Image (cartoon, rainbow, N blue to C red):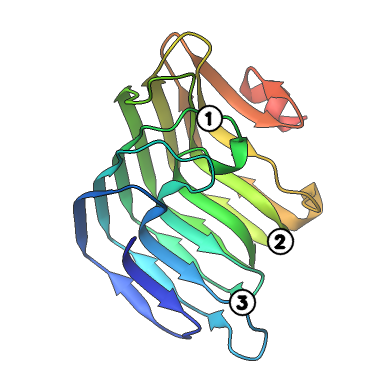
Amino acid sequence: LYAMQVYRESRTAIKNNTISNISNNGTIAGVYLFSDVATNPSSYVTISGNRIKGLYRTTPSSATYIAGIAVNGAYSDHATISNNVISDIYDASPTSNSFYMPAGIRLDGGIYTSLFHNTVDLRGNSISAGVSASAALMLTGTSYSALTSKNNTFSNSMVGKTGSHAYAIYVTATGISSPSLNINYNNYYAGGTQATFAYMGGELRDIAAWRT
């Protein structure tokens, strides 16, 4: 279930919307950007100034995800995601596979994707009956080139069952390396008793570990 979707469309703008109180049993995204065809990409899409809050996946699922904004596919290029505010994302699913963990902003590939001045604030108690995990920003997939992320705030202080994790940023993407990233001047916060600053090849406890 996508509140707003851009599929195989170019030079589209999604601006200044309020998206709230959406519940579903499968995949949920406030805004979803996707293309699976090189000859018909989703190019130069702008997602800006939106307020996304209150997304709920009410039934456990092991093969779907929930995110405020999701970008999917190698052919979603030159997207600009800016000045969005995302909060209150809740998932009933235990996290048995990190690929499907709930996230504020989720990138599953992307070419020349830019994130500027977004605020993600995940907090409160998880609605999952099992061990869970969540991330303010999640990078997964394989197709990345020239990702820029500047002047964003990624905050996560969710609390779940014993053994759960609240990540500010979670990276499982393969084929992504420092030369293809321009990540600077962001604010990261992982708070609460289950806070873990970041994950990239293993758990990173602080900004110093992330920088190395």
CA separation in Å, label 3 and label 2: 15 Å
Q: Give the residue type at disc 3.
A: Asp
Q: Find residue 144 and name its label.
A: 2
Q: Which of marks 3 and 2 is nearer the N terminus?
A: 3
Query: Where residue 135 sits in the image (x, y, percent)?
Result: 49, 35
Q: Nearer the viewer, mark 1 or mark 2?
A: 1
Query: Where residue 76 sits in the image (x, y, percent)?
Result: 58, 73
Other-residue count near label 3 (Cα within 10 Å), few / some / many at <14 / 14–19 / ≥20: some
For mark 3, give the secondary structure.
loop
- At x 38%, y 67%, the residue is 47
Q: Residue 73, located in which quarter of the rendered image?
A: bottom right
Q: Find residue 152 and name its label.
A: none
Q: Earlier in the sequence, mark 1 or mark 2?
A: 1
Q: Residue 90, located in which quarter of the rendered image?
A: top left
The one nearer the camera, 74 or 176, is 74
Other-residue count near label 1 (Cα within 10 Å), few / some / many at <14 / 14–19 / ≥20: many
- At x 64%, y 83%, the residue is 37
CA separation in Å, label 3 and label 1: 27 Å
The one nearer the camera, 77 or 116, is 77
- At x 64%, y 58%, the residue is 147
For mark 2, give the secondary structure.
strand
* 185 to the left or right of 17: right
- At x 51%, y 79%, the residue is 44
Answer whether residue 144 is visible to the viewer in this image.
yes
CA separation in Å, label 1 and label 2: 25 Å
For mark 1, give the secondary structure.
loop
* 43 to the left or right of 156: right
Residue under label 1, please give it: 95
Q: Find residue 36 and name its label.
A: 3
